[in-house]
Image (cartoon, helix red, strand yellow):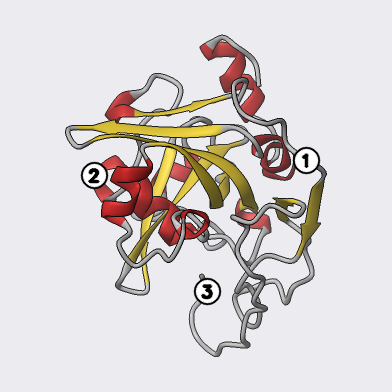
Amino acid sequence: MPASQSEKRRWLARPATEVAPALLGCVVRHEDDDGAVAIRLTEVEAYMGSDDPGSHAFRGQTPRNAVMFGDAGHLYVYFTYGMHFCANIVCGPVGLATAVLLRGGEVVEGEELARKRRPAARSARDLARGPARLASALGLGRELNGVDLLTGTGGVSLDAANEYPEPRSVATGPRVGVAGKGGDGGRFPWRYWLEGDPTVSRYRPGNVRRGRSL
């Protein structure tokens, strides 16, 4: 990942399918009044806007997904299933609404705080193993939707992982839970993960649904 803010912005303003695998090994950090938690990304998914039936932006801009249509480098946080928050990094040119879902990672700073936020976690590897768990461990909620990761607004930032182990071989496959009407039927191998990493979530194919799109 480039060093300067402007270079990082340009680096992220590429297609999500290029940005996603390159984010593996990078670190998302959130610091608030409770303290700081940092997570090294080990699993992500790319979503390609209006060209992607699995994307929140497939049917156009709405108040919910408006952040996706803005500048690369911003955080898109959404509430799902009436229970959890999930987080994405907006990428690509303005208006295309492409983004990368943060699916899983390793807590490399603030494990004690992450455990307080995730008391049901059985082990350290489960603290951020899955998109809702990752958002919970980082303390990401609706109030952080739209913050700029490159300026550190809201205490959230994105950095290269120079002090942490280099990413191992990258694997790719179908996205989790995206299938049926309003999904992609598992056609697009846009899920990327570090091969063999214990913090990568277990793959579950999506069920065919007769409802609205994701």
Label 3–label 2 contact, CB within 8 A: no
Describe residue 188's horizontal placement relative to residue 60 as left or right.
Answer: right
Q: Residue 176 at what x, y percent from top left?
A: 63, 69
Q: Nearer the viewer, residue 200 or 173?
A: 200
Of circles 2 and 1, which is in front? 1
Residue 124 location (% of width, % of height): 47, 54
Q: Whole-percent x and y of residue 127?
A: 44, 55
Q: Spatial distance from mark 2 to mark 1, Cα to Cα?
A: 34 Å
Viewer-proximal residue among 184 and 140: 140
Question: Would residue 40 be found to the left or right of residue 115 on screen?
Answer: right
Q: Quadrant of residue 3?
A: top right
Measuring 72% from the left and 30% from the top, which residue is drawn there? 166
Question: N-terminal of the two: label 1 or label 3?
Answer: 1
Q: Quadrant of residue 146?
A: top left
Q: Amino acid at mark 2?
A: Glu
The residue lying at 73 percent from left, 45 percent from top is 17
Circle 1 sits in a helix, a strand or a loop, which is it?
Answer: loop
Whole-Å distance between the Cαs marked 1 and 3? 34 Å
Q: Earlier in the sequence, mark 3 or mark 2?
A: 2
Q: Amino acid at mark 1?
A: Arg
Q: Label 1: which residue?
A: 168
Residue 139 in view: no
Kindly identify which numbered label has been placed on residue 143: 2
Q: Nearer the viewer, mark 1 or mark 3?
A: 1
Q: Determine whether 6 is above or below 175 in the image.
A: above
Q: Residues within 10 Å of mark 3 (few under 14, many from 20)?
A: some
- Look at the image and tell me whether residue 20 can be seen: yes
Return the residue at label 3: 213
| Kind of residue at disc 3 | Ser
